[in-house]
Amino acid sequence: MEAEAAKLIGAGLAAIGMIGAGIGVGNVWASYITALARNPASKAEIGANIWIGFAVTEAIALFALIVALIALFA
Amino acid sequence: MAAAADGHGGGGGLDPLHQFEIYPILSINIGEYDVSFTNSSLWMVIAAVVSYLIISRGVGAGSLVPTRMQVVAETLYSTVANMVRDNVGDAGKKYFPFVFTLFMFVLFGNLLGMIPYSFTFTSHLAVTFAMAATIFVTITIIGIMRHGLHFFSLFFPAGAPLATAPILIPIEIISYLSRPVSLSVRLFANMMVGHTLLKVLGSFAVMMGAAGILPLGLLVGITALEFLVAALQAYVFTILTCIYLHDAIHLH
């Protein structure tokens, strides 16, 4: 296989890692809405933590993207 | 530079990574080391000056009915003060200036980077990793100074059966050592990816001519999202610093 083709395939494979982050971010918000529906009074307490959970999960997608970019350009 | 879609592609070519290029403004060489004053350094100075001006302007008035600038300064201050109080407790009070400085520097680095043709210094791993490594080393030293050798009980959760030690301790050590990496890569990747995305969408808008109105509309939405991400990542960066500080002071 040519090195150029392998690079492109590798970058595409690295992007598969984003599936996990997609499921994870969906889970974060789904749990948030479930929690709010059950106990609307808890909004102030959950409010700040949800952003941490979101940012930490979203970072996984970005790690996958960095690997893809390294495969393409480095 | 991010939102600047108007033909900045360099002859129509799509080069979304061009905006992250560092070039020296004032070349300085000490011995064999290159310590030039670059565009990255320039924007760091601007971020520091802007955050200083906002705080000093806001505090300077100090009236009972706050001026607009005072509201900005007080909101920024109370956000970080609450964050430190909630996550670290009273013992964290003396580390507040450090955390606040960090928050302001990252926040204004991210926000000033949203100005077209400016430079986002937080989109470089060298910058974010230098900050994360400083935080990591500082917090480890704080923990060891407070607890002495007892600090290393951080690597073994209290109450776990002793038989699990050979598995748990390596895992805890690896997770502790990966903190500076994840802290720095999160900020760097978020900023770099966001700005690359804006540039790619901006190039689409230019290339498509009249139909470019569609990607342009998307671009407006993504730009708003990038402002959210800029503030959110500064917040997350500081709150994780607070959580690490809490671990070092209270040991779980």
Image (cartoon, helix red, strand yellow):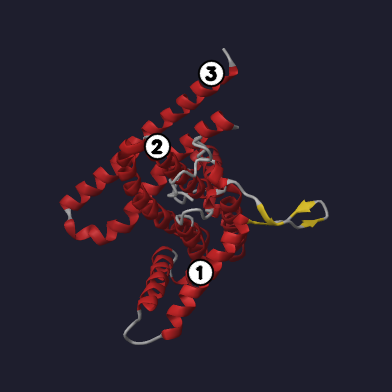
Mark 2 vs 1, N-terminal side? 1
Residue at 42%, 44% in the rendered image: B198
Residue at 62%, 61% in the rendered image: B141
Structural crowding at the residue carrying mark 1, measured as other residues with C-alpha within 10 Å and reported as few (<14), some (14–19) or many (≥20)? some
- Tell whether A45 sits left or right of A36: right
> At numbered mark 2, what does the secondary structure look like: helix, strand or loop?
helix
Which residue is disc 3 drawn over?
A5
On what subunit does the disc labeled 3 rest? A
The image shows residue B250, relative to residue B152, as above or below, that is below
The image shows residue B85, relative to residue B130, as above or below, that is below
Which residue is disc 2 drawn over?
B204
Same subunit: marks 2 and 1: yes
Given this view, does label 2 or label 1 mark the residue nearer the observer?
2
On what subunit does the disc labeled 2 rest? B
Quadrant, the C terminus of chain A:
top right
Structural crowding at the residue carrying mark 3, measured as other residues with C-alpha within 10 Å and reported as few (<14), some (14–19) or many (≥20)? few
> At numbered mark 3, what does the secondary structure look like: helix, strand or loop?
helix
Dots 3, 2 in contact, CB < 8 A: no
Between B17 and B76, the one nearer to me in the picture:
B17
Which residue is disc 1 drawn over?
B50
The image shows residue A18, relative to residue B135, as above or below, that is above
Q: Kindly identify the amino acid type of the residue bearing the numbered disc 1.
A: Val
Q: Measured from the top left, where is residue B205 in percent x and y?
A: 37, 40
Q: Measured from the top left, where is residue B119 in percent x and y?
A: 54, 54
Q: Measured from the top left, where is residue B242 in percent x and y?
A: 47, 61
Same subunit: marks 3 and 2: no
On what subunit does the disc labeled 1 rest? B
What is the residue that sits farthest to the top in this orientation?
A1
Residue at 44%, 30% in the rendered image: A15
- How far apart in space, not on screen, are marks 1 and 3 (Cα)? 47 Å
